[in-house]
Amino acid sequence: MSEVFKVGLAGLGTVGTGVLRLLDEHQALLEARSGRRIEVRAVSARDRSRERGLDLSRYEWCDDPAALAQRDGLDAVIETIGGTDGPALDLARACLGRGRPLVTANKAMIAEHGFALAETAEASGTALLFEAAVCAGTPILQTLREGMVGNRIDRIEGILNGTSNYILSAMERQGEDFAEVLCEAQRLGYAEADPALDVGGGDAAHKLAILAALAFGVRPRFAEVEIEGIRDVRAADIMQADRLGYCVRLVAMADLETAPGGGSPRLLQRVRPCLLPAGHPLAAIDGPTNAVLVHGDYAGPILIQGAGAGSESTASAIVSDLVALARGEARPSFSIRAADLRPAECADSGAREARYYLRFVVADRPGVLAELAAAMRDARVSIQSLIQEGESAPDGGGPVESGTMIALVTHKAPARNVRDALVRLSGADSIVEPPLAMPILMD
Amino acid sequence: MSEVFKVGLAGLGTVGTGVLRLLDEHQALLEARSGRRIEVRAVSARDRSRERGLDLSRYEWCDDPAALAQRDGLDAVIETIGGTDGPALDLARACLGRGRPLVTANKAMIAEHGFALAETAEASGTALLFEAAVCAGTPILQTLREGMVGNRIDRIEGILNGTSNYILSAMERQGEDFAEVLCEAQRLGYAEADPALDVGGGDAAHKLAILAALAFGVRPRFAEVEIEGIRDVRAADIMQADRLGYCVRLVAMADLETAPGGGSPRLLQRVRPCLLPAGHPLAAIDGPTNAVLVHGDYAGPILIQGAGAGSESTASAIVSDLVALARGEARPSFSIRAADLRPAECADSGAREARYYLRFVVADRPGVLAELAAAMRDARVSIQSLIQEGESAPDGGGPVESGTMIALVTHKAPARNVRDALVRLSGADSIVEPPLAMPILMD
């Protein structure tokens, strides 16, 4: 086992160069821990001449990343190119098709093509590993695949997008609205120039689809994740939630309903802003941190928390996969063989009950509250408490100011009833802006 | 790989029977995840006839646990007998000496004999695994050995004893003193009839010695852990800490100082009650939960949290080790080969600086404060703020009531100076009870 473990690396952005730095800095440590010396032999990137603060002359250069799949003598290839399709997917297919292990940080590619890639890997008897794709260096996939291997997983909940959590935490602390805090986050490097994937919930959904597949032994179903981002959450909502003893977090959650008749299990996957009570383990997660709470039937709830992004953290995860390969450990990508992953159907989220926080911005007009209350009653959603900003009477009789915010908390109701109430109100002239509905999670 | 993985089990207490239940209940799941059917073939316990709610007729019975090391055809043996020495250690030596993998939940045995056992295992080319020995089903050893394998670990901090954390949390919530809360904890099953190992810090020290060995690549040094338990903490201390914005937790911490001249590294291992600021990740850990914060140089701080005891959680950890063996993965017990574990020396804890919370109970006598202040000054510990219970003047001139509590917070000072101040005061007639010193940890 003293043989060198030879690696090809595609992509030399911050993640790829982070991997090179880590492997250099910790060469002796990694050799002691894995029993083998790990060496990068060949690299590929779009632009050879870009200044990266690294001496690339030590590595063979390939203009075409796909050449790393062909090049003789590599024991594994690392993909840090990114993108759902294109060169990353071409490289993955080429490596796995030829029986060459692939390590990737590419959550979009795994969420969308992970099942097909895992099938390809198994057909040629090789490994596809992607610890870095979910929460970077916070080792959650490994926890599911190994530490909790003896558990039926009942439910997963997580804060999977650091940008969104940074923004919500900052809105909470500073009392500022989304747009202002986003600008600040972009300036500080916590949000990308195009923040759509982060604040829209898509990035968290990619990670959730991967986690759900591993946890429940089902094929990843990214397309069926119900997604709602944080753009519509206002500082005023966070303040209201705080007064009620809650904080607002973008929560990704998944569970699996097993069909009583033995049919296909039904998978529920949702990403949406939620209210969390102060004692909930995810309520303490502040700033750009990621955290996943896994409910195992024997181990109980396990929380794992850490940085969810960044070149060093991502490099840490990639190297942990490399070490597993160097040690000769090649577990199935999704914990069980791809052929055994069940094709889950989509669970009916409308039937799930929760208490809800609802916020309306209403026009300055008499009878607005009566209209709201009637819609709720007709949809069979009962109101537990009503909070109205401004001084007007809480009854429909008095006038409410133009653009007045009305927030209320419902009793437990099925999601479909809440949606129905909002549909009933969607045409109302008195509603100035689309309402916001956030479920209240219990711990 | 479709061959059955055959296991022997020694000890049929709550942990052993938990393992049998888990393996029964999740047989199909474990086969899908490990690629092999895992079956217990032989069991051993002190009393065959004891009612355990289990049908033992399916297993071969051995009166002598050591027989499991000899019996033909077992792929691994699980030890849940407990105890530092005696039959558990005999069994471990017999198994590992014959090249039979051993899985154990025995923290005392691993903390004290783990290095010798790991050497035995390596000499005969077999595996010694003990995930269950630290925080039960919360997979912290695996996180160190695998998920964070690419990191130099800078520091570990943890809440490693559920009983102590339950008691401190309850004292905080209820404002009651140690003795009362301990009784309640014993009634509820959170504390044992003999709580010495838990509340005295020894149990946390066992776990810390194991964690430190894995994290830093050094031989376990249980005998050198500096241990202080929670018996002397009073409800009044917790209340004072709370007023200052801190909570009190029994914190286990370890770090490794590397010697500048290339000599032996120096290991610091301490278990003691500390003050944690509200924002510290360990401050949120409430009740009987365990949590470990690992500071990696690439992954950053990773927190892992969950149940730290209980038959089901412990069974989850034991089974994760079994699955690793069934998959043919046999990593070194302490992350690197036993022969490569460095013999660390003990670091000088006296040189470490911190702010301290000091509490004195003083006699009803004039000049007490002056005496305290002089001792602090002579030991070069400067007082940041002084809190005195009762109505007397904060200066040494006025009388203070008999048994009056005086608490103070120091500026940053080396631990040895604080100890020196307490030594200077140890003979003073005015000090009614031994003083309590707790460092203030920063996050």
Image: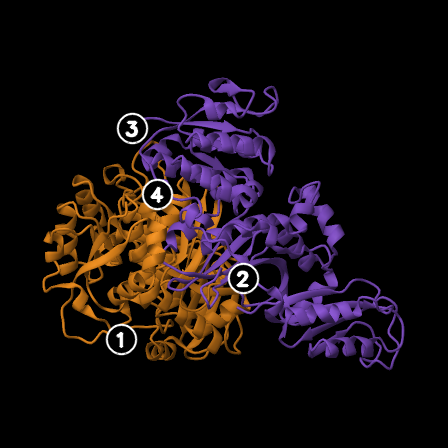
Chain colours: A purple, B orange
Q: What is the quadrant of residue A14 in the picture?
A: top right
For image coordinates 72% across by 73% down, the residue present is: A408
Please say if the residues under marks 2 and 3 sit with CB atoms less than 8 Å apart: no
Q: Position of residue B67 (x, y in %)?
A: 10, 57
- Tell me the kind of residue under disc 4: Phe
- As measured in the structure, the alpha-carbon distance from the residue carrying label 2 to the one carrying label 3 is 48 Å
Three-letter code, disc 3? Ser
Classify mark 3: helix, strand or loop.
loop
Q: Are marks 3 and 4 on the same chain?
A: no
Question: Foreground: B274 or B95?
Answer: B95
Q: In this rendering, is residue A307 above or below B88?
A: above
Local crowd at mark 4 within 10 Å, few (<14), some, or many (≥20)?
many
Residue corresponding to mark 2: B278
The residue lying at 56 percent from left, 69 percent from top is A442
State which chain disc 4 sits on.
B
Q: Chain of mark 1?
A: B
Q: Where does label 4 land, which residue? A: B216
Secondary structure under tag 1 reads loop
* Marker disc for residue B193: 1
Q: Are marks 4 and 1 in contact (CB under 8 Å)?
A: no
Q: CA distance from mark 1 to mark 3?
A: 51 Å
Secondary structure type for disc 4: helix
Where's residue A378, x and y in %? Answer: 74, 78
Q: Give the mark nearest the N terminus, 4 or 1.
A: 1
Relative vertical location of residue A237 with respect to residue B141 in this rendering, above or below = below
Q: CA distance from mark 3 to mark 4?
A: 22 Å
Chain where mark 3 sits? A
Do callouts 1 and 3 mark residues in contact (Cβ within 8 Å)?
no
